[in-house]
Amino acid sequence: MANSNATYQDIANYTGFSKTTISRYFNRPESVTEENREKISHALEVLNYQSNKVARILARGRTEFIGIIVPNMYMSFYDEILDQFLKTYDKYGYKFIVFSSNGNEESERQYISELLSYHVEGLVMLSHTIPSFELSSYGVPIVGIEREDLYISSVNTDNLEGAAQATRLLCDAGCEVLLHINKEGDDDRTPAHRRIDGFLKVCRERNITHRVFTYGQESDYQDLQQRITVLVDDILTTWPGWKKGLFCSSDSIANIVLNDLFRRFGQLPPDFRIIGFDGSSLADQSVLPLSTVEQQVDQLVDSAMDLLVSQIRERKEPEQNSVSEPVHRTIAPVLRQGATV
Amino acid sequence: MANSNATYQDIANYTGFSKTTISRYFNRPESVTEENREKISHALEVLNYQSNKVARILARGRTEFIGIIVPNMYMSFYDEILDQFLKTYDKYGYKFIVFSSNGNEESERQYISELLSYHVEGLVMLSHTIPSFELSSYGVPIVGIEREDLYISSVNTDNLEGAAQATRLLCDAGCEVLLHINKEGDDDRTPAHRRIDGFLKVCRERNITHRVFTYGQESDYQDLQQRITVLVDDILTTWPGWKKGLFCSSDSIANIVLNDLFRRFGQLPPDFRIIGFDGSSLADQSVLPLSTVEQQVDQLVDSAMDLLVSQIRERKEPEQNSVSEPVHRTIAPVLRQGATV
DNA sequence: TTGTAAGCGTTATCAA
DNA sequence: TTGATAACGCTTACAA
């Protein structure tokens, strides 16, 4: 039978050693004679020993847990990030306890406190409801990704540069008017907001006609689609005959626009160019492969783990450091040419 | 400062009570006088107490952890399932430790053993590499979802019925030839294999021309797209002029077919009907909303948690039960009419 | 190379 | 209603 719940004590009794020696067998095998190692190893088999990490955590004070809070799973960006984190297990050995907050600030606090009581060694925040100032006060290593990050360490895509590249690409493709769609009313300090800045910067540099559109709190996908349809109507009637370049703040939006145009015209009209943002799998699954500014998820996550691990180390040697300052890292985006520009 | 690491002992010293009383304050508050409760509560504030669940686990033997292993995150079915599990936290209070296996049998074993050593109370398996016989031997409550389940409890969509409904719908829409695309070489005992059975059953009942196509181990999305293109070529030349009904074993495949047709014809040709399977968000994001057989993810997960929790309870009262038999639950799928049939 | 004993922060069992 | 004391299973000085 599995799950026999043998303990070091049982192994010790069986072999005639002490618990300590059993512990050594696992933690510094070289300090146990070959011969005795075999005896112990044999006993483990016989008693079907199953290690108990909970006890080890308590004794050592290291959980090897990292907590991670995402806003949701239906935006593919978040599950690509999550997947990437899970993959770091082989490299770092950290296990992940995952919560999905749905943007509810109160549950988010509860989740954090739950995580803290499990003594997670670090926290990854993708969700943006709780201000970084509060997060920093929890006194646990923490890193934010693509969220407001004034008081905490963070990793972000270089949104300004990504947006600028996308905008330049549209220019160079001969577009005569440049349009940008972004989410409205987002906090100014949010990284995604830099995409507007990048767009405007290039438009002004090149002195080209442009406009920024925003969509609001459309709650579900249906509403969002309708909002976009209205917007496309607007664009078609305002600039008929112009060569139009549309930079969308996400692949999801770009996909909706593209679908809308295909339903109207059976193709991407020749006077239309579209580019998205994120480089999510949706960009490939679209009716035409979307051109997009790819966020390098692997690098975002690598960097985040790196920051987290060094914070965790720091706090083990509380000798020198005053409370060290937040570190902000930036990952270069990659322009990915699809079929829409 | 946060993270002050006060313990019951500190609270006890501060208030003059014993550790035991502090413990009672948390676990059976009514057994402590109102007055003393306030004293303690005050001390908690002052000392900034942060509970330590690791110690509690060790003392009580209950972790409130459930382990979950998914094959990957890029198939939206899995992350919708995962998201749904995370949401059960408010109802059941279980935390989830998540691993993504990428179909690697060896890592999967390692993950399981890791999970067991954290004394998870139960296991959810979505991944199919490890046979259920082996899983059942681990002696921990376990439930599989849409995978081979001979020796373990499980929850599955009624794939036979779903496929039958889809096929009937195509018939009723006046299709003259019915086609089905599924993954080849899949283990016969896999639930998704029932979709072929359902398709064939209805085709024979109605005595209608039909064919089953399969695709193989195409490793990435590109290859898969190419395979599908060849397949569509084949279909177009074999049944020109026929009214064709195509039942795909996933929304992902249906989406590829639909995109392919749109690229060729700028529309879904009038002699083509398509229906997918899963009811994933991709079905909505497609160039035309896909008709699909929706797997009721919320019910799948509800049922799974229910099975798991009752197994967990059972094993707390080891009095009566011999090793209880695996339970298999089935969730009815829902036909969702999109614009493709 | 091995063993003794104290400790990690809770809960559980008795008594008082 | 409260308190001593012994678990829970492992780690870690310190000794032998």
Image (spheres, coloured by chain):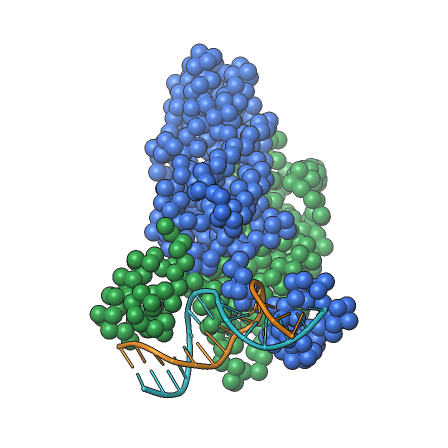
Chain colours: A green, B blue, C orange, D cyan
In the visual, does D14 lie left or right of A286? left
Q: Position of residue A50 (x, y in %)?
A: 38, 59
The C terminus of chain B, quarter of image: top right
Residue at 72% over, 67% down? B32
- Residue B9 in sight in this render: yes
Identify which residue, B304 or A146, lies in the foreground: B304
- Quarter of the image for residue B306 reads top right
Instruction: In the displayed orientation, state which residue is furthest to the left.
Output: A35
**Residue at 58% of width from left, 79% of height from top?**
A323
**Residue A46, position as x, y percentages in the image:** 30, 57
Residue B65 appears at what percent x and percent y?
Answer: 52, 55
Residue B25, above or below A225: below
In the image, residue A150 lies at what x, y percent?
A: 64, 69
Residue B337, placed above or below residue B147:
above
Closer to us: A123 or A34: A34
- Observer-nearest of B311 and A249: B311
- Would you say residue A178 is visible in this rendering? no
Direction from residue B30 to residue A191 in the image, left or right? left
Q: Residue at x 45, y 16 (%)?
A: B203
Observer-nearest of D15 and B195: D15
Q: Residue at x 42, y 37 (%)?
A: B149
- Pick out the residue farthest to the top: B207
